[in-house]
Image (spheres, helix red, strand yellow):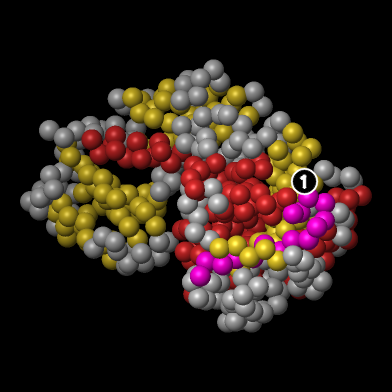
Amino acid sequence: MKKLSFILVFLLFASSLVQAQSISEIINKMDLDSLQLTLREFSGEQPTTINGDEVTITNRVYSNNELAADYLYQKLNNLNNITVTNQLINGETGRRNIIATQLGKTNPDNIYIICAHYDTVADYCADDNASGTATVLEIARILSTQCLDNTIVYALWDEEEIGLVGAGYYANQAATNNDNILGVLNIDMMGYDGNNDNNFDIDVRDVANSLTMKDDIISILNTPEYGFTLEVNVVNPGTTASDHSRFWNQDYSAVLVGESWETNDQTPFYHSSSDTYNTLNFPYYFELSKLIMGYMVTKAGLVNVDNTVTQSTNTLVANQDAVSYQWVNCDTNTAIAGATNQSFTPTINGTYAVEITSGSCIEKSECIVFDSLGLQEFDAAEILFYPNPVQENLVVEMFNQQEDVVLELYDITGKLVLSETSSKNKTILNLSDLASGVYFLKANTSTRSSLAKILKD
């Protein structure tokens, strides 16, 4: 009898996802599905939920982008280890930078900034600059689960399109406060590669340590372990027509990273409502976002805390020793009373994570689907899932079915995204509204269980 084998395989796979103890592992946590969902929502090509209401961000023109700013604040405020503020430009309501700060545990005064502008001149503007904004949010989502040596500021600028106003205001304030900003990586348009040559630009000038920043990015690009296939164009002297230049004005180190204007391969839909989601080159965009993450995590520095979770029989175990623990029910996002030991044995099936505290460092694992029923696994001839990969409708076909089956679909983080109980021999699940990516479909009866990996195109 094949009992629990699928559970162990899934948990081992999930365990590999939650390990985040090397730069390479952090880079590979970048998720194209997450980036694409943010792009569609932020460019107004699909609705989203802001403050509990379903809304559509119709545009982000500086005079009409309060909803966009609320979206950014909400996304960042939901993360761990981050403090988010609305920086009002010149103290004026309706003109605001969204600033999220993750304090370093070792060198809190050493500051690195990853930034992009979020305002536009037209509707949609997926490349300019939802592409950069989504990358900043994705990097924040991942690094916020880690304890870092240095401070990272995730900055989203307003009013770039009318004169780099938001970044200029922040840079002036930082200089007045003598902030120890060691590097500013600005992203402005990074999603278009019309000829598929993987070229991108680094715009740089000999200001402070900007040239060293450029060299460090190229070093990461050329690290064989990371496997990048991008081709860099160094533009020196680089353009002053984006937010990084406001930091050059204050003698801070800064660079611009983006698609290749140097080889005339920028989007032809620049500053128009034709700059939409479907014009982007996603393999190129994803690789460039991973390179930017590589630079940021290298400069951030990872505190050596292991947030790996593995399984021992029917028990989840945190691998980090000599710390305090709090196990969490991911389905309800609540702490489990009394579950404060290194190991945790769930009493019911569910999705669980552990929050690990070591000194001033707090890290939370990603969620893991746990099933301790011990049911016998379906034989291959008893259940089929097709087509796989699937674009819209997934068929679950069962043979000799005598009882109801509970079908539960989980995304790669362990979140339940679909649940249905069926008494039919053939059940059709509509997945058309789900983002592309990897999912896991669990099928349970009172006597049988199965877990299948589903690829959504």
401 relative position to 356: left or right: left
Residue found at x 80% / y 57% = 206
377 relative position to 355: left or right: left
Q: Which of 74 and 269 is in front in this view?
A: 269
Relative image position of residue 452 (x, y in whole percent) = 26, 49
The extreme right residue here reads: 176
Which quadrant would residue 240 be assigned to in this image?
bottom right
Q: Give the range drawn in magenta.
A: 197-211
Residue found at x 57% / y 40% = 145
Quadrant occupied by the N terminus: top left
The reply to whether residue 240 is in sight is: yes
| Residue of label 1 | 182
Q: Residues within 10 Å of mark 1 (few under 14, many from 20)?
A: some
Q: Which amino acid does label 1 sit on?
A: Leu
Residue found at x 79% / y 37% = 109
Which quadrant would residue 171 be assigned to in this image?
bottom right
What secondary structure is marked by label 1?
A: strand
The reply to whether residue 351 is in sight is: no
Quadrant occupied by the C terminus: bottom left
Check the image and report above or below for 321 versus 203. Answer: above
